[in-house]
Every structure is written in structure tokens, then in C-alpha cells.
Image (spheres, helix red, strand yellow):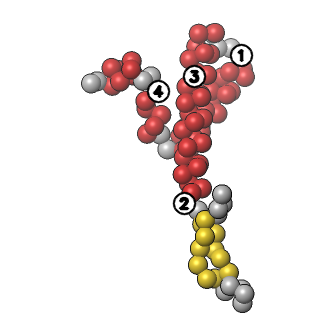
Amino acid sequence: MSESDLHAVEPHADVAGLPFEKALAELEDIVRQLEGGRVPLEESIAIYERGEVLKRHCEGLLKRAEARIERITLGPDGRPTGTAPLDPS
């Protein structure tokens, strides 16, 4: 399956491979375009949909990063005793 075939099936498939910083930068650009109000309606709809995909992707990457962050636990004497999840919920 070629890349154009892949985009026909899933037009935003490339988002899954974007690092957080690039996805966020593209999302910020989309917001600027939409807020500017100079984009034709059909294009606005298309970039809004891409923005939604980028937003979900960024949220997922942040959740995975948060899951990897741990806090240092301290004993009664104030010395580190180990680590625990940052948010034990």
C-alpha cells in the first residue's frame, strides 16, 4: 500500500509518528489559521479535523510521559528511600 493509499484510508495516519513538539507546533499553527478567519470553509473543516487528531495524539503522549515520571519517597530521616508513582490514582 502506497502512502497516498494509506492517506485515503486514514488521512491523518502520519500524526501517530510525530514527536510531541512537532505535533504541538502544527496544532498551534492550525489554531492560528482558524482564529485568523482567512481560511475557506472546506479547508477550515479539514484542518479542524486534523487539529482534533493532533490534540488526541499530544494528550496520549503526555499521559504516557506522566506515567513514566516518579516521585522520590523520603524516610522519616529525610533520606530518599525509593520511588513511587507521581499520581497514584
Q: Amino acid at mark 3?
A: Glu
Residue occupying image coordinates x 42% and y 24%: 10
Between disc 1 and disc 4, the foreground one is 4
Res 30 quadrant in image: top right
User: How far separated are the C-alphas under marks 1 and 4?
Assistant: 23 Å
Nearer-N-terminus badge (1/4):
4
Residue tagged by mark 4? 12
User: How far separated are the C-alphas under marks 4 and 2?
Assistant: 27 Å
Q: Residue 53: percent from the left, percent from the top?
A: 55, 30
The answer to the question of whether label 3 and label 4 lie on touching residues, with beta carbons closer than 8 A, is yes
> Which element type, helix, strand or loop, lies under badge 4?
loop
Residue tagged by mark 3? 49
User: How far separated are the C-alphas under marks 2 and 3?
Assistant: 29 Å
Residue tagged by mark 1? 37
Between disc 4 and disc 2, the foreground one is 2
Q: Amino acid at mark 2?
A: Arg
Rendered position, 19 above or below 52: below
Residue occupying image coordinates x 59% and y 28%: 51
Residue tagged by mark 2? 68
Nearer-N-terminus badge (4/2):
4
